[in-house]
Image (cartoon, grey):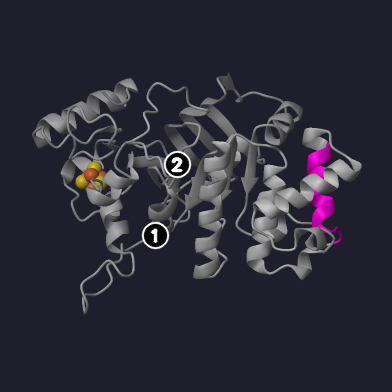
């Protein structure tokens, strides 16, 4: 989490660097149509870390790939807008999208070996990124590659720059990948489970590094993970995804302090260490369903301990958790909580059919 949280830095007056509006990314297979990302909206501001959290199959990585223009056939973006610096990226050609990927948005994947080529030195790979994106070559590129390796905390960078990926440890490789991403001088860094393959100590170091880089460069970070503990460490705001939808959005403080959606409550109760001694670790029974039809009901209903009859009939849309609470929204028929159940259900029903958004 950056040192200035959403509460002490007013972002409402700032233009978001990224604005996602009603994005739907669909995969067409022989058997079914999978709505992997199904009508999500959120913003990211400069200097802010927005966490995207959910189980596998929730749509987190497809969201990232949609933003990067990396959705492969049989998938395609079917609806919505992805505005980066105010410009809509949906509908751009692959060539235009490549340019944006190099000059504004960079991505760090879970496995650093997917980004590093084993037959080139780490330095040459960073220099290639510097040549492509900043036009640097020769000695200037070498010096910048060394300074980027130093910036990501690699000791003895002058020597390391000539080494190959297999000579780096797992944590060092991920640092090198972050250095490569920084070579594009991005304003938005998308991190897809970047610490999942690392042990806890190295994970903490990488999170600390991202925090430092963010402060130095006013980087916006979108951080994808299934790990609520990691989200607590790094995020200013959090979007919780379930079966292609965002089912709760709040500042990290509010989300962890007063989670509202039954799914978020379940996720938090299933964090190891969040229990009294001797109490059993809570689990959410069942799996995330494949979102293969238009939602006319709550996709979480089969697993929800609070489900009631209407949950099978009405699709919950994102609403404030209580009237007027714009910064904390959830897609559950129990909200806004200051309305009666009947009134709340009627609100969702009217919004669902008219395609409305939060109040
Ligand atoms: S809408 Fe119903 S099933 Fe869905 S989360 Fe809320 S209470 Fe549970």
Residue tagged 1? 229
Residue drawn at (19%, 37%), measured in percent from left and top?
335
Q: Position of residue 278 (x, y in %)?
A: 21, 79
Res. 161 visible in picture: yes
The circle drawn on residue 107 is: none
Q: Indicate the quadrant of ligand 1 in the picture.
A: top left
The vertical placement of 302 against 21, above or below, is below
* Dominant secondary structure (helix, strand or loop) of the stretch shown in magenta: helix
* Residue 150 or residue 63, whichever sits in front: 150
The circle drawn on residue 50 is: 2
Q: Position of residue 134 (x, y in %)?
A: 78, 34
Residue drawn at (54%, 48%), measured in percent from left and top?
212
State how many labels appear: 2
Q: Position of residue 341 (x, y in %)?
A: 11, 36
Secondary structure, mark 2, is strand
The vertical placement of 197 against 114, above or below, is below
Residue drawn at (69%, 54%), measured in percent from left and top?
150
Q: Quadrant of residue 342?
A: top left
Res. 291 visible in picture: no
Left-right relation of 138 to 186 = right
Which residues make up the magenta segment? 119-131
Q: Quadrant of residue 214?
A: top right
Establish whether ligand 1 lies closer than 8 Å to the Cβ of label 1.
Answer: no
Residue found at the very far bottom of the displayed protein: 278
Left-right relation of 30 to 46 = right
Sequence-first disc among 2 and 1: 2
Q: Residues within 10 Å of mark 1 (few under 14, many from 20)?
A: few
Task: Say whether residue 128 is magenta.
Answer: yes
Which quadrant would the C terminus be assigned to in this image?
Answer: top left
Residue drawn at (89%, 45%), measured in percent from left and top?
139
């Amino acid at each position: 989490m950056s040192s200035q949280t959403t509460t002490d830095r007013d972002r409402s007056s700032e233009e978001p660097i990224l604005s996602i509006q009603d994005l739907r990314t669909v995969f067409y297979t022989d058997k079914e149509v999978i709505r992997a990302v199904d009508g999500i909206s959120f913003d990211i501001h400069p200097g802010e870390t927005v966490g995207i959290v959910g189980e596998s199959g929730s749509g987190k990585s497809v969201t990232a790939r949609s933003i990067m223009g990396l959705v492969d056939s049989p998938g395609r973006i079917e609806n919505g807008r992805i505005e980066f610096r105010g410009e809509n990226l949906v509908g751009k050609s692959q060539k235009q999208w490549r340019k944006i990927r190099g000059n504004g948005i960079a991505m760090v994947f879970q496995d650093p070996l997917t980004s590093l080529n084993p037959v080139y030195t780490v330095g040459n790979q960073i220099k290639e990124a510097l040549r492509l994106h900043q036009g640097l070559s020769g000695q200037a590129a070498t010096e910048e590659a060394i300074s980027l390796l130093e910036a990501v905390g690699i000791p003895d960078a002058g020597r390391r720059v000539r080494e190959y990926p297999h000579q780096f440890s797992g944590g060092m490789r991920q640092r090198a990948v972050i250095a490569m991403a920084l070579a594009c001088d991005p304003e938005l860094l998308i991190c897809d489970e970047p610490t999942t393959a690392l042990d806890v100590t190295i994970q903490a170091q990488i999170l600390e590094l991202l925090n430092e880089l963010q402060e130095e460069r006013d980087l916006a970070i979108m951080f994808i993970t299934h790990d609520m503990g990691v989200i607590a460490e790094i995020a200013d705001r959090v979007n919780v995804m379930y079966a292609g939808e965002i089912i709760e959005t709040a500042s990290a403080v509010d989300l962890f302090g007063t989670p509202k959606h039954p799914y978020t409550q379940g996720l938090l109760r299933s964090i190891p260490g969040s229990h009294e001694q001797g109490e059993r670790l809570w689990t959410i029974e069942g799996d995330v369903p494949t979102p293969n039809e238009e939602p006319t009901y709550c996709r979480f209903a089969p697993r929800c301990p609070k489900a009631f009859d209407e949950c099978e009939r009405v699709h919950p849309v994102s609403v404030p958790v209580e009237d007027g609470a714009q910064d904390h929204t959830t897609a559950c028929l129990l909200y806004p909580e200051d309305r009666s159940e009947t009134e709340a259900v009627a609100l969702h029903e009217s919004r669902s059919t008219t395609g409305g958004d939060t109040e």
